[in-house]
Amino acid sequence: MSPKDVLLCAGFAVALPMGQTLFKWAALHNEKLSGPVLVRLLSNPPLFAAFAWYGLTALVWFYILTRVPLSLAYAFSIAGSGLVPLLAWLVFKEPVGWRFAAGYALMLTGFAVLMQGQVRT
């Protein structure tokens, strides 16, 4: 993987948890709305932002896959998925215990093993 590919994959890995955060904001905003489900969905700007963000990240993912093998690119996504509980804790004050930290440390260790020798200059 070239440094550019690493940056693309790392950016994508961070973009996905941001999308999950947008969906959580949309869910919280939905609780403040009233009316039928369809009306609430159509009057929920954070939900539209989340969909737009996921559409954009899907295009980035497609571009990444034209350059990087799926097996390597997806490893970044898995590493990034551990950021979702961290953002939930930071932004929404959701409880996250020591098991999360230990599990994420194991995930990052596995990621480091996978990436050994993959980055080339």
Image (cartoon, grey):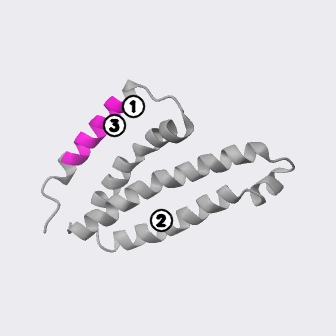
- Taking the view exactly as shown, the residue that stands out farthest to the right is 35
Identify the residue under disc 2: 57
Question: What amino acid is at disc 2?
Answer: Thr
- Taking the view exactly as shown, the residue that stands out farthest to the top is 98
Are the residues flagged by discs 2 and 1 in contact, CB closer than 8 Å? Answer: no
Of 30 and 68, the residue lying toward us? 30
Task: Report, in whole angstroms, how far the alpha carbon at label 2 lies from the one at label 3.
Answer: 23 Å
Q: Earlier in the sequence, mark 2 or mark 1?
A: 2
Identify the residue under disc 1: 100
Query: Element under label 3?
Result: helix
Are the residues flagged by discs 1 and 3 in contact, CB closer than 8 Å? Answer: yes
Q: Is residue 97 left or right of residue 23?
A: left
Residue that appears at 70% across and 59% down: 45
Question: What amino acid is at disc 1?
Answer: Phe
Residue that appears at 29% across and 58% down: 71
Of 84 and 74, the residue lying toward us? 84
The boundaries of the magenta stretch are 100-112
Chief secondary structure of the magenta span? helix
Of 82 and 93, the residue lying toward us? 93
Q: Is residue 70 left or right of residue 25?
A: left
Task: Give how far across and how far down residue 63 sits, in percent.
Answer: 38, 73
Question: What amino acid is at disc 3?
Answer: Tyr
Identify the residue under disc 3: 104
Query: Eyeballing the image, is 89 above or below 58?
Result: above
